[in-house]
Image (cartoon, rainbow, N blue to C red):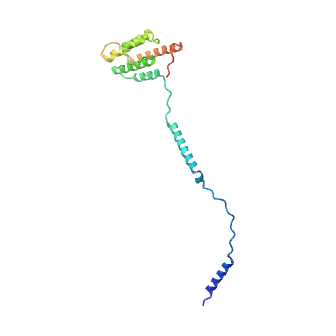
Amino acid sequence: MKTGPLLAMFLCLSARAATNDIPVLRPPRGEMTSSFWLQYGWLCILAGVTALVLLTLGLRSLLRPHARPAQPFEMTVCQNLERLRERRQDGTLVSEVSRILREYLHYALELPPDELTTTEFREALRAHPLMSMELATQTVDFLAHCDRLKFAPAQDGPPLDSVSGALKLIGRIETNRRQAVMQGQAPPRAA
């Protein structure tokens, strides 16, 4: 009989019986807290969304073209007329210059928004307090000459530099308006 394995087994069992004591345990730890994400996850998400919205709004405001301050209407009218200066003098150009001048007169003199004929312009301009009789007559004569060139372009007569003529009339009317505002006869126009 082999005694080696039995002896080893006996020694193991006897050693085990001698050490049945409970080992010394470490002291108990406190209750485990939640992780950072469980505690502050909703705040992180809220802060991220807020940062994204602010970044988007900031980029939109930086990349958006900013509106230029509005320039006075009379300056816009003069620029529109200057653009026409290089065009050939014909019925189309005269018609465009006449239309621009009529729009300017409606605005500058606060005439009714109706489209007025040249005869109606004559009456309205002569009755207007900002217009002298001479300036009203020159304006109406210019509009009448434009009408003749628009509707009967083959007429003989002195050539009309319609753009320069309209700009001169606008300049004189603006001078009258500024003088009337300075003298308190007319309220200043809002741009």
How many tags in the picture? 0
Name the residue: 52% across, 39% down.
Answer: 57
Residue 109 locus on image (x, y percent): 45, 16
Name the residue: 33% across, 16% down.
Answer: 149
Q: Residue furthest top?
A: 133
Name the residue: 64% across, 85% down.
Answer: 7
- 16 relative position to 81: left or right: right
Q: Image quadrant of residue 96?
A: top left
Residue 189 locus on image (x, y percent): 49, 19
Vertical comparison of 10 with 71: above or below: below
- Residue 159 shows in the view: no
- 180 relative position to 5: left or right: left
Name the residue: 53% across, 42% down.
Answer: 53
Vertical comparison of 177 with 28: above or below: above
Residue 172 locus on image (x, y percent): 46, 14
Relative to the observer, which residue lies in front, 106 or 45? 45
Q: Image quadrant of residue 165?
A: top left
Vertical comparison of 164 with 45: above or below: above
Q: Residue furthest bottom?
A: 1
- 119 relative position to 57: left or right: left
Residue 117 locus on image (x, y percent): 36, 15
Relative to the observer, which residue lies in front, 176 or 22? 22
Name the quarter where the N terminus is drawn.
bottom right
- 70 relative position to 21: left or right: left
- Residue 80 shows in the view: yes
